[in-house]
Amino acid sequence: MVYGIFKYTFKKSLDLLDNMKNFSRKRYSFFLILPSLLIVLTCGVDEHTSKDWSNISRSNSYSGNGPAVFHVDTTGNVNLTYSLKIGNTPKSVYFIFTNTTMGDAESYPTVQNIDRKESATSNAGSSKNFERNEIETPDPAHNFPVSGTPFISEFNEKALQGCIVRKGEKGPKQYNSILGKTMAYEVGSENDFYLHSEYTQETDTINALCQAKVENVHSKSLYVWVDKNVFRENYVNQGMIDGIAEKFLREGEDNDVYEWVSAIFGNEWGPHNYNGLIAPDNSIHILIAEIVDSQNHNNSIIGYFWNKDNFENTVVYNGKEHPSNRKVMFYLNSNFVKKDMTTIYSTLAHELQHMIHFYQKIQYSYPFGKISETWLNEMCSVVAEDFVASKLGIEGPRGVAGTEPTAGAQGNKDGILPTYNLYNYESVINWYDTYPQVLRNYSITYAFGAYLARNFGGASFYQKLLQNKYTDYQAIEFALKECGIQENFSSVMRKWGAANLLSHLTEPPPGYYQYNSGNWFTSYIGSLKYEIGSINLNNYVNGPKIYTTMPTGKQAKASNLYYKVGEGLTGTLIHKIKMENKVQLTVVIQ
């Protein structure tokens, strides 16, 4: 469009110049006209006016007494006249706008009520337009420990995609003493480990003791290591270490985190066709050490899996060397082992899923070595915590007692869903690279992942989601297809949006809108039974964020925005709605 305006303006300018009587007038006129050409070229045209818009109409009629959901399908950029007949019984009406694109953000829709002739975009962007105040960074009262760091998450995603240069066979000289062959260890054995300091962004070397060992259970051997500097009675003691080992790997069936998580997602390591990665030996290592983050030493990191340890040698990423421990392993923060063993038990499932995710995806994507986008990987990990919470008898990310199948009590401040309620308008597939903003990502991916688990088959759905070649939203579409469900990522996003507003109901309208059954959601992998509890987003502090005035600016890709049309409404409502391509409208009536 800009090119067309330029071409037209330029032609008119040339015509004018041709009609000039003398050179001086030509020269003078040219310099008068030139600024207008530059304005056209540099300023461009208003984005809304530069697009082609279709004038269309859609309507729905509500009948009955219960809640209803209407998906209003449109194509392209539309000026939509939407008519909704709701009868004489007063109802609350909500619009949900879903940006279904996986690419660029789209402009927020504009909404105008025809009857009142009032624009819903007046004073847009001010915090007074929200039902509660906008919060730019997560409320400290709702902060929760996270697994991993943005740096490690980025590294894990790109490890085999050409972003990492492998060193020579022996690695840098200073690391030779640690790069020994894999061996069996005994309780009391000592070993040096490389430990990344998130605070200094350097690699430290620590000496650790093997203080727990479990051999040949589920064909695996577990070694739990603890940094000598934190191994003492009033910090990390033997009872804590034994508790971690027992919860992770134990003789018998259906009684440990390893069996529960690996049954869903698969093996954490095994045969492969990649040069530079360690050979399988059926051993898993857990290192307990102090992990200090980069945010003023506030110890927000509970642990992490870093796939650089699956490499034979030191790797270089963004100009820094990261030596490998040459073990299938993950790390736990000693500060959390000391003060919060319940969260540590949940983290065992989280980090094990990351281990498994790395191996499964590089196997399915061979020879490309493509690893899942961070949001998808993290979603699987927080849902892994969800799957084991009732088995461990702990709250998990839901923030409700692991023995409680219902959605719990009102005013709940626990778990990670209070943060989601604050930021339910943000993208599912974006990932922040700073703390505490990254807390939003964990909460959003859990909310979406919990919805998927409760509507599409639980553990079996997640098994299909992971064990395929796709590493983005297509993995979800693959799992839906394998489960015989006629939905795609976009339609699921829209239905998830409606489920957010209907989570207080144990019997929502049919069509995949259920967060809350009032009981367990049950699924099976073989003989293993998985129970995940109900969720009512209104039970958490603040409740879901709902706009009462439409904001301006851009709506993030793969996101939902919730707008309250009004309550106590009757008769026929008519709205003018301007929506860009890929933004879709869903209407919820309660």
Image: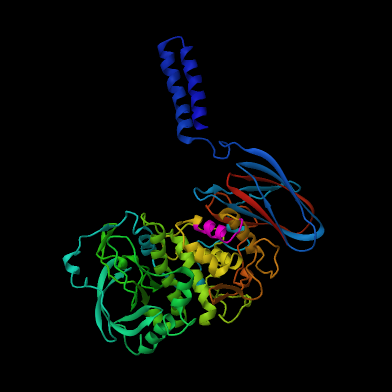
Relative to 280, is 97 above or below? Answer: above
Residue found at x 20% / y 60%: 168
Foreground: 523 or 9? 523
Residue 484 belongs to magenta span: yes
Relative to 516, is 190 above or below? Answer: below
Foreground: 144 or 510? 510
Judged left or right of residue 173, residue 259 is right
Foreground: 82 or 463? 463
Residue 588's spot in the image, x, y percent? 69, 58
Foreground: 353 or 359? 359
Residue 163's spot in the image, x, y percent? 32, 55
Residue 75's spot in the image, x, y percent? 62, 43
**Which quadrant, please, contains the C terminus?**
bottom right
Residue 226's spot in the image, x, y percent? 31, 81
For residue 143, say whether it is visible: no
Majority secondary structure in the magenta region: helix
Residue found at x 46% / y 56%: 470
Instruction: Report which quarter residue 128 is drawn in.
Output: bottom right
Q: How many marks?
A: 0
For residue 14, say whether it is visible: yes
Tell me which segment is drawn in magenta.
Answer: 475-486
Residue found at x 34% / y 58%: 160
- Residue lying farthest to the left in this orientation: 173
Relative to 549, is 396 above or below? Answer: below
- Residue lying farthest to the right in this orientation: 88
Residue 166 belongs to magenta span: no
The chosen color scheme is: rainbow
Judged left or right of residue 242, residue 440 is right
Relative to 378, is 118 above or below? Answer: above
